[in-house]
Image: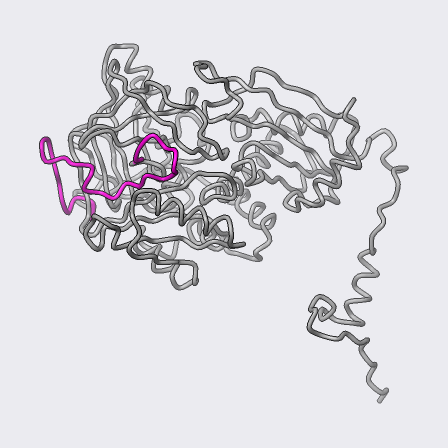
Amino acid sequence: MGYDGLRGWLEEVARLGELKEIRGAHWDRELGGLVDMIYRELPVAPAVLFDEIEGYPEGYRVLFGELGSVRRLALTLGVPLRSERILDFIDDYRHRLLDMRSVPPVEVADGPVAEHVDEGPAVDLFKFPAPFHHELDGGRYFGTAHVVLTRDPEGGWVNGGTYRLQLHDRNVLGFYSTPGKHGAIHAQKYFSRGEPCPVAVAIGTDPLLWFASTMEVPTGVSEYEYAGGIRGEPLPVLRGPVTGLPVPADAEIVLEGEVDPVERRQEGPFGEWPGYYAGHSRLEPIMRVKRVLYRSRPIFTSANPARPPDDQGFHRGIVRSSMIWNALEMNGITDVRGVWCHPSGGGRMLTIVSLKQRYAGHAKQAALIASQCRAGAYLNRFTLVVDEDIDPTNTNDVLWALCSRTDPEKDIDIIRQAWASKADPLIPPGSTTYYNSRAAVLACKPFEWLERFPAVAEASPALRERLLDRFGRSIYDPSVVSHPKVASPAG
């Protein structure tokens, strides 16, 4: 992969020129506010590493924005970067997924994360600079860019997911996982037996493992196996003595404990990835932490979900696009030219599929499958299908197709009672069941008179090539006076 663990990854990111270091900020709203500003105002935002955080020793660092660029994703996933065009990277990565074989982790006797161990009364989560992210949050959040590890009590497989963890006390965290997520299903199985759910939390992992934990990995497949398959070699793990769960040997911080089947505390509100303080505050389960392992000078990884663009919607959009593209083809949808899960919808709420229509109903099939396959189903709002002449990553082109090729009366279908989340700002306060509706939109030419649809008014590829050959790319530079090239004298 070209790096060794999070610290090796940071060295490579610094060499790419994509690491920003900030010193002296406060954990209370300043870390989140600065990241929000950077990601909103820069076209390509760097990874942001905070040090000398007020109230904490030098070296207790917080990292945001791990996977916020194509270059950092390429480094993490080991995918050669043939261009920085987003659709090329999506296509390359989806083919990597098709060829991937799961690689189980390997258990080792020791690892860097075991450098320090706090147990029982010595556990104090406040020793780490967990941020108070947004101005209206209900508290500090210990888990936003981390891996929550649980084991299915029936099947025995280990899941890694990213579920938010609010810091309540020195050894107590709020535990919120959306219904339908694997971690929530595992916990409910334990609770139905009246038993606590063993949980481990890894912070500052290899970014590849955190990446896997944010994706829709199939049921029964561990994120360790998924990440190992991408890397092509097993990830090293330690056996947690409290939970029996495998924990990353090279993580920066690992917590072990259990989620109580009965006790609840107020959780939230929290500024979430759709860009709102949705979900309000409500009673949620708690995790009691019994053991903490951590490295010297630990790096605390965080994500700052907020009004898009934020520091985690980009990578989720790219990878979810790859997974939906593959799901379409696996379900018999041919001639897909591209898929883009737009970051303005947090990489989930707006999916755009480009395809070459081959038969009547082709576009409708694509829209319905893309909106309901595992990778695309969770809190989707709009799924648009456009023709092959539209780059789904080009928002202007997509809106043009929507305006000029969609007949609202016949080209929009509404799907009701679909999978949603309390993070959806349209879920009424106090709801305990999360449904949403979504639109499947055909923003493409009518198939029944496809060949007679009006021609597009734009310079043809042949004319563009001739003009570029004659005037060169200087036509795009306002500081240069462009002249036609003068042919060289014959002979």
Q: Exactly how many numbered labels are in the figure?
A: 0
Viewer-nearest residue: 369 or 259: 259
Vertical comparison of 58 with 324: above or below: below
Q: Look at the image and tell me in which quarter the C terminus lies.
A: bottom right
Q: Residue at left 31%, top 35%? A: 141
- Left or right relative to 130: residue 17: right
Q: Quadrant of residue 413?
A: top right
Residue range in magenta is 112-141
Q: Does residue 291 appear to the left or right of 145 in the view shown?
A: left
Q: Is residue 232 magenta?
A: no
Taking the spot 75% from the left edge, 41% from the top edge, the residue there is 400
- The x, y position of residue 175, in whole percent, is 31, 25
Q: Position of residue 366 (x, y in %)?
A: 67, 29
Residue at the image point whose x is 67% and y is 26% from the top: 440
Quadrant for residue 271, please give it.
top left
What is the x, y in percent for residue 226?
A: 40, 37
Left or right: 64 as drawn, with respect to 351:
left
Q: Position of residue 158 (x, y in %)?
A: 32, 29
